Image (tube, coloured by chain):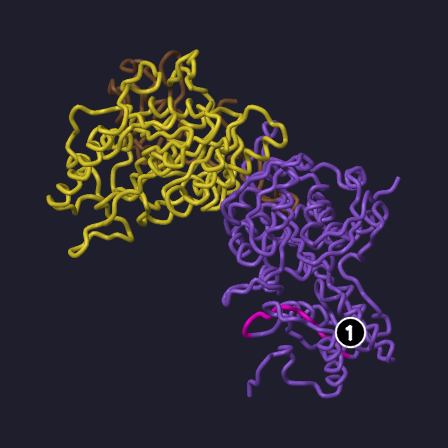
Chain colours: A purple, B brown, C yellow
């Protein structure tokens, strides 16, 4: 029996909606925001035509969207929401609430820049600013991975060792609005892969509970420790889920990260999301010229692939972290995370931070080729400033 | 049961002693609050007509029905005095003491 | 819609179980009485949501959990949205015969919580939203709220030589929710407990959203003795600064129309928070009350309270 029912030509947003329908959430509560809107629109169409049976709430804000999902999760329902940018920030209080309360909500986030200035195009400042919120975060590269990760996200979130909400990130417009051929699994295959949501972390009449309570200084730390440990434990669950998904539905993604031509690479670029595709093309071009380069796609930022990253980059001469983000006044957040993980490698490899794509500025193959050039020169020059704004359009000196 | 009982104090030794996340049994009580009182209500059963007004209006749920009249429990009585003030038969008075 | 009352709801027939018990509210807290009574009417098949505020602060400090039935704290702005989610989740899971009720204070209802409340009513979600009104943000130390009455001293509307307390009127939440076309809304007071019980009972069978605004004195914030909370909650209705009313089937109905109001000054004299008011302030307050009542008496239907029973009122 084939697990995949059809092949369709759809956008990243459409693929998310298809994945959500297959996952059978009990409650969907989401507020429209560019460039996520097609997700909530497709889901509404699916509710209308009867192909998606769910309680679809027209909430009046993003804060209410996640708050409603938490309420539904608190009675044992499987829930989904979606947002982007300003909407993500509006629900930040509820994000900490969902993770602290151990509610396995799944959220799609369309990576979009943050005001001010206002900008609706793609960068990753929104989700990266929320790495401390206690959510598992995964970044997908294409529409197929988007659909597949929505399904996997529920399996990971609802695992009793994890019980942590999961954010699935798609680059806004670049991935949400571009089209590709996607394999859509059959409902039967997904039902076999993803069992119904069962939990004791819920209110019921059989076992009444008091939930989302206060903890004094005497107890608060222990609850945080539990959460922290759960995300660390999630790494094994993620690997297991990736493996099962591959076995049952035919596609493996490599778990916490994906490494391309890194084994003997001297210069490695670390990327997030859809720009990885462009990076691989550049890697192939440079390899054809005899250059030893590779690219690592970080799929998950929480949990962070510390060991995997260390072992893969041990022999590299220099590394570059390419991210569409900067923690203003210091360095990119992904860069900070990578450097911390590698600080114990005992090597003196240079790591550069390529801040690119802010506010939707395009990242070309030429830009990436230049990044590898930079890496090959710093191995000997050890620059004072490791944070590089790529393609700044004006002189600054 | 008509009301939850107070159980021994929570003294965790291992992380597993904690509930998973902020979720625990409804009505999980570990301490009484009678130390808050500076005065204590006393019912005069001769004057009590069993109208149940005090039972209705006690914010703590400390007053119970008993033999057609009322009795006051004291685990969470804070001595607010509403029962004495609102009794239409003057059957409850507040005594300035703790028990 | 009418409801056949098979057995009158009163102190004798009320569920004897206590569902809000062991909490750490101040002695004499009107809000805690409002929660206690409502939960006895609603029974054990109830999911309760309580936002940041007094009732959550006193009822949910681990490991002392004072709600005897299912209850959860919501974010401060999110009581109504969490309730919408609870109701939707329970519906989707096929859980039958449940009540989803929220108890929010001034802030959680009229200010930071008003957006979510508006959305829930707009969706006609089957939830019961109860606002326990103690006329300030009590949990954080008696700061002014949208429900603080004109002239009241709070910590952010101090009464001094230049300004004498709050300078604005209470937000009219009852009419705001009515303007949404809510299925059922009511005003109540813990000073008229039978009326309050009846209104909760009625809300149980509303197949849409219900809103009950219950006046709940706070001895700590008002500067009153802990024993006069019920008395004050009756006084405010008797002097006309609060009314007992319902909104149902698109019509406003006054449950109680006093032939004569008791003096507002008497009500104020019992409370520290009004001690600074001058005769001209009282006059202004009386005039405002009279204007409101003239409007209410002209526009609303005045009939007797919902089917009730032997109660002192």
A197 or B17, nearer to the observer? A197
The quarter holding residue A295 reads bottom right
SS type, badge 1:
strand
Q: Which residues are magenta?
A: A318-329
Q: Chain ID for label 1? A: A
Residue C268 is a magenta residue: no
Q: Position of residue C194 (x, y in %)?
A: 34, 22
Q: Which quarter of the rendered picture does the C terminus of chain A lie within?
A: bottom right
Residue identified by numbered label 1: A268
The quarter holding residue B47 reads top left
Q: Position of residue A40 (x, y in %)?
A: 61, 46
Q: Position of residue A57 (x, y in %)?
A: 56, 40
B73 or A80, nearer to the observer? A80
Residue at 26% across / 52% down in the picture?
C157
The quarter holding residue C288 reads top left
Q: Which quarter of the rendered picture does the N terminus of chain A lie within?
A: top right
Residue at 15% across / 56% down in the picture?
C161
* In the image: residue C233, left or right of residue B55: left
- How packed mark 1 is, by other alpha carbons closer than 10 Å (few <14, some 14-19, many 20 or more), is many
């Amino acid at each position: 029996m084939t697990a995949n029912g059809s092949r369709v030509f759809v956008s990243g947003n459409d693929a998310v909606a298809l994945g959500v329908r297959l996952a059978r959430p009990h409650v969907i509560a989401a507020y429209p925001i560019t460039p996520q809107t097609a997700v909530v629109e497709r889901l509404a169409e699916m509710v209308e035509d009867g192909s998606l049976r769910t309680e679809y709430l027209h909430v009046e804000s993003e804060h209410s969207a996640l708050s409603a999902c938490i309420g539904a999760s608190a009675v044992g329902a499987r829930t989904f929401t979606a947002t982007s940018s300003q909407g993500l920030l509006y629900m930040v209080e509820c994000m900490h609430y969902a993770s602290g309360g151990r509610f396995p909500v799944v959220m799609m986030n369309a990576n979009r820049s943050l005001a001010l200035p206002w900008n609706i195009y793609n960068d990753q400042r929104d989700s990266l600013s929320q790495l401390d919120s206690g959510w598992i975060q995964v970044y997908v590269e294409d529409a197929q991975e988007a659909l597949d990760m929505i399904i996997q996200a529920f399996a990971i979130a609802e695992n009793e060792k994890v019980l942590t909400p999961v954010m699935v990130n798609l680059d806004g417009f670049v991935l949400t609005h571009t089209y590709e051929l996607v394999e859509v699994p059959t409902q039967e295959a997904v039902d076999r892969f993803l069992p119904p949501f069962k939990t004791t972390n819920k209110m019921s009449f059989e076992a009444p509970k008091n939930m989302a309570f206060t903890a004094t200084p005497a107890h608060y730390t222990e609850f945080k420790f539990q959460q922290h440990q759960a995300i660390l434990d999630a790494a094994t669950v993620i690997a297991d889920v990736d493996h099962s998904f591959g076995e049952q539905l035919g596609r493996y993604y490599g778990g916490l990260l994906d490494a391309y031509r890194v084994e003997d690479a001297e210069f490695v670029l670390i990327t997030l999301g859809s720009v990885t595709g462009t990076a691989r093309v550049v890697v192939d071009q440079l390899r054809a010229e005899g250059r030893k380069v590779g690219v690592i796609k970080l799929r998950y930022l929480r949990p962070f692939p510390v060991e995997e990253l260390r072992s893969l980059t041990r022999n590299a001469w220099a590394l570059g972290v390419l991210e569409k983000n900067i923690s203003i006044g210091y360095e990119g957040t992904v860069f900070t995370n990578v450097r911390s993980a590698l600080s114990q490698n005992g090597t003196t490899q240079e790591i550069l931070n390529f801040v690119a794509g802010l506010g939707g500025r395009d990242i070309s193959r030429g830009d990436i080729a230049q990044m590898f050039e930079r890496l090959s020169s710093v191995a000997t020059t050890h620059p004072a400033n490791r944070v590089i704004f790529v393609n700044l359009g004006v002189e600054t000196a | 049961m008509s009301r939850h009982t107070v159980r021994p104090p929570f003294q965790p030794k291992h992380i597993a002693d904690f509930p998973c996340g902020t979720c625990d049994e409804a009505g999980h009580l570990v301490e009484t609050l009678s130390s808050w009182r500076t005065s204590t209500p006393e019912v005069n059963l001769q004057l009590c007509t069993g109208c149940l007004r005090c039972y209705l209006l006690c914010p703590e749920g400390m007053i119970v029905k008993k033999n057609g009249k009322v009795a006051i429990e004291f685990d969470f009585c804070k001595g607010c005095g509403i029962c004495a003030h609102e009794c239409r038969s003057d059957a409850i008075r507040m005594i300035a003491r703790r028990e | 819609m009418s409801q056949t009352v098979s057995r009158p709801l009163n102190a004798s027939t009320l569920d004897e179980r206590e569902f809000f018990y062991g909490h750490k509210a101040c002695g004499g807290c009107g809000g805690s009485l409002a929660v206690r009574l409502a939960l006895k009417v609603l029974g054990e098949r109830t999911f309760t949501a309580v936002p940041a505020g007094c009732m959550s602060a006193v009822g949910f400090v681990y490991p002392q959990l004072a709600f005897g039935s299912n209850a959860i704290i919501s974010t401060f702005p999110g009581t109504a949205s969490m309730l919408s989610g609870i109701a939707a989740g329970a519906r989707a899971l096929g859980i039958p015969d449940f009540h989803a009720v929220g108890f929010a204070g001034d802030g959680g209802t009229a200010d930071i919580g008003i957006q979510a409340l508006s959305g829930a009513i707009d969706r006609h979600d089957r939830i019961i939203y109860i606002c326990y009104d103690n006329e300030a943000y009590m949990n954080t130390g008696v700061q002014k709220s949208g429900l603080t009455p004109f002239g009241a001293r709070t910590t952010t509307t101090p009464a001094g030589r230049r300004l004498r307390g709050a300078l604005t009127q209470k937000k009219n939440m009852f009419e705001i929710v009515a303007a949404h076309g809510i299925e059922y809304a009511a005003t109540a007071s813990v000073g008229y407990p039978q009326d309050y019980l009846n209104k909760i009972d009625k809300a149980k069978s509303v197949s849409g959203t219900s809103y009950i605004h219950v006046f709940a004195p706070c001895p700590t914030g008002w500067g009153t003795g802990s024993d006069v909370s019920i008395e004050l909650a009756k006084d405010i209705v008797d002097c006309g600064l609060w009314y007992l009313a319902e909104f149902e089937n698109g019509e406003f109905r006054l449950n109680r129309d006093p032939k004569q109001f008791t003096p507002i000054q008497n009500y104020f004299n019992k409370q520290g928070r009004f001690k600074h008011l001058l005769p001209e302030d009282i006059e202004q307050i009386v005039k405002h009350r009279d204007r409101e009542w003239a409007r209410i008496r002209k526009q609303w239907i005045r009939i007797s309270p919902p089917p009730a029973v032997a109660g002192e009122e």
